[in-house]
Amino acid sequence: VPLRKKGDAYHHGDLRQALVDAAIQVVARHGADGLSLRELARRLGVSHQAPYRHFADKRALLEAVAAAGFAVLFDRMRAAIRNPDPVAGLIESGVAYVRFALEHPAQYRVMFGARELPSGRPTENDPGDTVFRGLVATIERCQQAGMLPAAPSRDLAVVCWSIVHGLAMLAVDDKLGPRAEAELTVRRSVELAVRSLDRR
Amino acid sequence: VPLRKKGDAYHHGDLRQALVDAAIQVVARHGADGLSLRELARRLGVSHQAPYRHFADKRALLEAVAAAGFAVLFDRMRAAIRNPDPVAGLIESGVAYVRFALEHPAQYRVMFGARELPSGRPTENDPGDTVFRGLVATIERCQQAGMLPAAPSRDLAVVCWSIVHGLAMLAVDDKLGPRAEAELTVRRSVELAVRSLDRR
DNA sequence: ACCTGAACACCGTTCAAGT
DNA sequence: ACCTGAACACCGTTCAAGT
């Protein structure tokens, strides 16, 4: 990669990244529906056609917004999972998951509601799959430590992810009361669920 | 209410209902983003301004679509809950919930993703609240029958709803494999979760 | 390569009238 | 009351050029 030329003729050394960053901000403030490619271009001082050099269409830009969100989410979960007690790691990663959703509600919605019903069926190579595989691995560590029942790890992972994803969606929809209380409700719920599964 | 005049000068005896029905169809086929008030009016043979007599804006129409979905969903859950065994009732209502989401994925998204971040904070008098209260009641019946732990019923309800809501979202996003398998995965997951909570 | 400006076919919403 | 038609200020996307 060549050094970024400063003050060159092009408006941005990295228009692509600038678009993604600005889109994340707009989504956070006005939701995915409030995102306009033309307005984004205006804000960045380029013509309204410039974004099409980097993204095929609006949907592609929103996918980049989603991908950036998944990267952050997965980082946080990996950090939380790095806990000597695997059950505590499971609980903390669940809490971290919901906390991310509460901090970035609109982006979280984009991450899971992006593709309405278009092309990709089997969702191969989805960033969400990476999160899921990490979850399965943690659960198997819990099982090896005898902390979870011997049910198929995939089933347990589906249940755990569903709880946490459901909590996140409900929290984002303000169904769990004020945000301050929501944090506590989440922690109580995740602990209740995991401790219930825990069959020592 | 006066009798509906047949064949009168107005194009529809009940334009409001016709709009909601047509919107549900369009949403099912093209998603919420594919819904256009102007196209809807064209399809129903009225001017593009006519819908504004019945709905303040597009969002209001989508809210009606959501409300219609909640009515059906709640009916199905009430039917499933009418089971002599309260635990079985809990399981079946969860399965019914996810089944509805799988049958009407786009409408289900509208039901829970409608309000991005606009006005209503505490979500008072939300149709979702009705579903939630029914769930709490069933859980308390389970507890009275000694089938569930003595944790606060609200916490248990949050966990149950989260599992089922999370499963529904994952299923709608095709994260649970092909639709045919998804049905089985859902049943296994709901049973695993509820039986785990079940502390006889 | 990357950007520009004009153009196309749409939107949601508002307004002033019509019956 | 309910509907109409013109108008406003936007969109996303495409095309033919510019440097």
Image (cartoon, coloured by chain):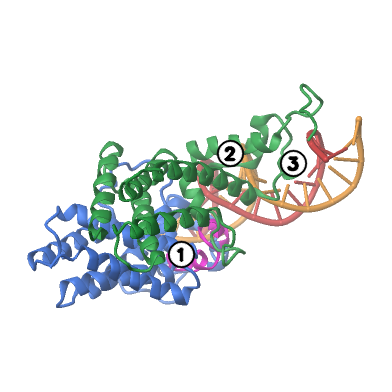
Chain colours: A blue, B green, C orange, D red
Q: Is residue A90 left or right of residue B173?
A: left
**Label 3 and label 2 in one chain:** yes
Magenta span includes B170: no
Pointer 3 and pointer 2: residues touching (CB < 8 Å)? Answer: no
Residue D9, by quadrant, is bottom right
Q: Amino acid at mark 2?
A: Ala
Residue with the mark numbered 3:
B49
Question: What is the magenta segment's predominant secondary structure?
Answer: helix
Label 3 crowding class (10 Å Cα cut-off): few <14, some 14-19, many 20+? few
**Given the current orientation, which residue lies at the most extreme front position?**
B145
Between A138 and A104, the residue placed more toward the observer is A138
> Where does the magenta region start and end?
A18-39
**Who is closer to the viewer here, A66 or B68?**
B68
- Give residue B155's quadrant in the image: bottom left
Q: Nearer the viewer, residue B139 or B69?
A: B139
Badge number at residue B23: 2
**Measuring 46% from the left and 67% from the top, which residue is drawn there?**
A176
- Reading the image, the residue beneath label 1 is A172
**Position in image of residue A180 (x %, y %):** 46, 77
- Mark 1 packing: few (<14 Cα in 10 Å), some, or many (20+)? many
* Residue A81 showing in the rendered view: yes
